[in-house]
Amino acid sequence: MERKHEDIHSITSDDVEKSKKPFFRRLIQGIFGDEDDEEENSSPIGNVEFLHSTFTYVFLFLGAGIITYILAFVEDITLSSANERITVRIKTKFINAVLGQDSNFLDATTAGALSNQLNNNIDRIRDGLGDIVCMLCRSTAQYLASTVLAFALDWRIALIMVWTGPLCVIITVLTPVLASSSMSQVFKVSEEANGVAEEAILNVKTVAACNGENTMIEAIYFFRSTNSRSIIILEIRVNSSFGSSSRNESRRNLRNARGIFLPRSICVQRWWVVIAEAGIVLAVANLNLLSSYRLGVLGPHMLDSRSATKKIFSLIDPEWERRREGEEPELTGSVDFKNFSFAYPPRPSHIVASDLDFALRKGESLALVGPSGGGKSTVVNLLERFYEPTKGQINLDSNAINRMEYRHLRSNIALVGQEPVLFRGTIKENITIGTEEESTEAVMEACRLANAADFIEQFPLGYDTVVGDKGGSLSGGQKQRIVIARALIRNPKIILLDEATSARDTQSEKVVKKTLVATAARRTSITIAHRLDTISNCDRICFIESGKIVESGTREELIAADGKYAALVMEQKLS
C-alpha cells in the first residue's frame, strides 16, 4: 500500500509543480501591474513604498522558487523510485517465468533471444513510464480544464477552437492499431538476429576455429533480408501516423490565429457579445492546443512501450506457478519406471524411449550403457521432469512425479552432467546454489568428498575465489570436481551421474570414483557411462539401444551371457 501511495505521489507532485506558472504570472503582474490597474490608478508612488513592494515580491519569488525546487526534487525521486520498482518487478517475473518453462519451450528458443528480449523490452518499458506517464496525466488534465474553461467563456468560441484536440487523440489511439502487427514482426526478427549474434560472441573461439565468421554474418543478414518487407511496411505506417504529430508544432500558430481572430470576426458579423478578453482567449487556446500537441507527441513512446509490454507479458503466464504446485511427500530414494515411452515434441514420430520398465530400491545403483542416441539421457531428463513421458509413469516411493512440486522433487535429486557448468561468482557461491546450506564447514566437507579441497585451499582466497565467466579461471577437471561438490552438499536421496568423471585426469578419477562409490551406499544412483570400468561396482547394468532395454543384470551376469555388453567390454579392453 505504501508503494502505491508513493507511485501516486510521484504523479501528483508533478502536477503541483507544474501549477507554478499562474502563480508566477500573478507575481509579475503584482510587481509591474497590468494595463487596467495603470489606467485606474496613475498616481506615482514613493521610493520606500516601491522598495517595500519590490522586496515583498522578491521574497515571494524566492519562496516560490524554493517550493518549486523541492517539488521537482520530490517528483524526480518518487518517480524514479516507482519506475525502478516497476521494472524490477517485471524483470523478476520474466526471469521466474523463463526458469519455470519446460524444456519444450527452451528447446525452441535460444538463450540469446531470451536475453535480448529481456534487456531491450525492459528498457523500452522503462522509457514508457516516468515522465511519459506524468506528461500524459498533465496533458489530459490541461486539455479537459481548458475545454471546460473555453465553454464557460463562450460555448460558440469553444466549438470552433477545441475540435483539434480529439483529432490528435484519435491519431494517437489509431497508430498502435495500424502498426502493431508490423512492429511485433520487426521485434521478433531483431530478437532472432541479435540471438545469433550473441551466440557467436559467446562462442567466439569455436566460430574462429571453424572459420565460421562469414557463416554467422550471413545468418544475421538472412533474418534481416527475409523480413525487410515487414520493416518497410512498419516504417510507412508509423511515419504516416506520427508525421501528423510532428507537424502539429508548425500548425499551432495557424490554430492560435484561428482561435483568436476567427471567433472575433464571427462575433462581429453575428453581433455576438464576446465576454472574454483577447488575452484570456489566447491563453485558453494556447493551453488547449499545447496539451493536444503533447498527447500527439506521446504516440511513438506509448506505442513502443505498449509493444514491449505485450511481448514481455506474453511470456509471463500467471498459470505457470500453479502448474508447478504439487505434493511434497517424504522420499527415501526408491525409483520405479512403469512402461514409459517418450518422443521429443519436435519429432513425435521418433520414439527415443519405448516401454522402459525397471525399478530401484533405496541405495541401489544402476548403470545405463549403450550406443549414443539410444535413450540413456532420456531417463535422466524424465526423472528430473525436464519433459513429461508420452506414456507410462515414473514413481518415487509410490508417488507419481507428475503430481509432485518441482522444487521439492529436484531438492531430492542431484545431477552431475558431462559438461560442468559454473556461474559467475565465488567457489562457495557455486557450490551452495539452490540450497539453504551455506556454512563454510558443509562446503569444505563436500569439497573434501569430491577431492576438490586440496586445490581450492591452495588459492589465496580459498573458497571465496572468483571462478570467472563460466569458470574460465579453472581447468576442466577442477570445474567437474566443484560440480560434484555442489551435488554432494545437498545430501540428495537420488544422484544422477552423466559421465561425471569424463573431464578428469586418471589419478583424480580414481579418487573421485572411490568417493562416489562410498556415497552411493547411502543413496540411489543412476550412472550413464561409456567407459565401463567406472561402473564395475553398480548393482545392475542395463544396455539400452534404440530406446529399449536389450540386456539387464549384474556385470558378471551380462559378461556370462556373452551378448552386446560383453562385446562392448571386449572392445574397450582391446582399445
Image (cartoon, rainbow, N blue to C red):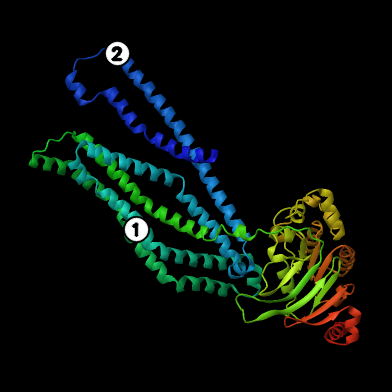
Q: Secondary structure at mark 2?
A: helix
Mark 2 closeness class: few <14, some 14–19, many ≥20 residues within 10 Å:
few
369 versus 112 height, above or below: below
| Residue 521: % across, % down | 89, 64
Q: Mark 1: which secondary structure? A: helix
- Left or right for 288, reference 558: left
On the image, the x and y values in percent for residue 314 come to 51, 61
In front here: 481 or 356? 356
Q: Please, what is the three-letter code of the amino acid marked with disc 2?
A: Glu
Q: Earlier in the sequence, mark 2 or mark 1?
A: 2
Task: Please state the horizontal and vertical placement of residue 64, each as a whole percent of the image.
Answer: 40, 27
**Residue that numbered label 1 is attached to:** 174
Please state if 471 lies on the left or on the right of 574 as rendered. left
Q: Amino acid at mark 1?
A: Leu
Image: 224 above or below 155? below
Q: Where's the N terminus, which quadrant?
A: top right
| Location of mark 2 (residue) | 49
Say which residue appears at 22% left-offset and 44% top-offset: 256
